[in-house]
Amino acid sequence: MVTLVHFLQECPHEMTGKQPQLSVASQPDGPKPSPQQKRFNTLLKKIETHRRTLEGWAAAEQAYTKLWAEEFRPAIEQIFRAQLDLLRVLDTSSTQIKLSKHDRLKLSDIICDLAEGLIDDSHPDNAELKEIFSRHFGDDFDEVQQEGLAQFKAHLEEKLDIDLSGGEHITSEYEFAEFLQEKLANHATAADAAEGSTEQPKKSAHERRKEEDLAKSSQSVREVYRKLASALHPDRETDEQERARKTDLMQRVNNAYAEKDLLSLLQLQLEIEQINTDHISNLPQERIKHYNRVLAEQVKELEDEIDVQNMIFNGRFSLPPYETTKPAQVLRKCNKALNELDAELFDIEQEVAFLQETPKNIKLWLRAQRDQSDELLDTGLLDDLFR
């Protein structure tokens, strides 16, 4: 089995080099850092921590993508084939063994649930699965899906007050999700246009101050950028080596400015000795405040990016979407998920083997299913699931 540790050793990744340090340092005989200066230091630490986390995710993504292709996808396909074998055995048993009305209804419900979970329009066994579902449910699968989507669409139209006409051709939940996303985007655009065409209410003093602060924060970033651009413009250099160095630095400056990455701009100033380590300590408090606003936005953007990486991993490995996963936990969670797949495959294969021994075993199997359902009810687990 390929492990995350082995993969990371085989595929080294680039890590951000150690950057010049920016911070407001306390002087033994001088004044203590102000609240804004302390916040500046805190925001810098958060940005560096989040960047390291994203570097970890970049490496982990390579690893778990490789694990997915080499370990998980084959395991999931094995489980699909085993579930298909179970479905076929159950379907055959339903025609060979005389069952009570209650048992027959229970078996049909299980068969329909299993078939519906396996149906995939891209799979070669899809027609067989739909036929089995329709025979036990009593209605055509595609018609049942269409009816369910129509009811869901009507519910959303009422709840969201939005027109969802034009999606009559949709046959799958995935297509409907894309259709809904497009409709919501168009609805939001139309609402914004309508709002813009009406007279806007007069802004409060608080809103005006907020806008002014935002403008000053953007201006602070532009000032840092202009100082760097003035010092590093490569066209002013006659020495080819120095021009190449400044071209590279100017590219970094442009990238940082485009991303509103104030920290990188300040670090570049420090790197080319345009400022020194005491620069931040000597800045006016109002300037520090504007810097902090920009840095706080950087922190939020990095946190959002980390959340996206977290959700992508959780989604791929069937974990709760909002469960916190860190890059260092990827190996453990991957191995746990693989073990769970192995256990699931073993259980299904055991069920198939038991049912194939003799058709009469279907009654014992159904009794075990009922006992399991009763146990869930008795322990209150179902209540927890739907709470």
Image (spheres, grey):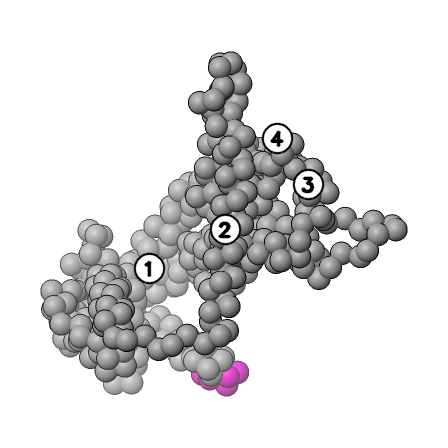
* Residue 375 is inside the magenta segment: yes
Which residue is nearer to you in this view: 182 or 270?
A: 270
Q: Earlier in the sequence, mark 4 or mark 1?
A: 1
Residue 103 percent coordinates (x, y): 30, 81
Magenta extent: 374-380
Between disc 3 and disc 2, the foreground one is: 2
Q: What is the C-alpha distance between the residues marked 4 and 2?
A: 22 Å
Between disc 3 and disc 1, the foreground one is: 3
Disc number for residue 21: 3
Residue of label 1: 83
Between disc 4 and disc 2, the foreground one is: 2
Between disc 3 and disc 4, the foreground one is: 4
Residue of label 4: 272
Q: What is the C-alpha distance between the residues marked 4 and 1?
A: 64 Å
- Give me the residue at 49% from left, 34% from top: 229
| In the image: residue 368, left or right of residue 29 | left
Q: Mark 2 falls on what kind of element?
A: helix
Disc number for residue 348: none
Which residue is nearer to you in this view: 89 or 71?
A: 71
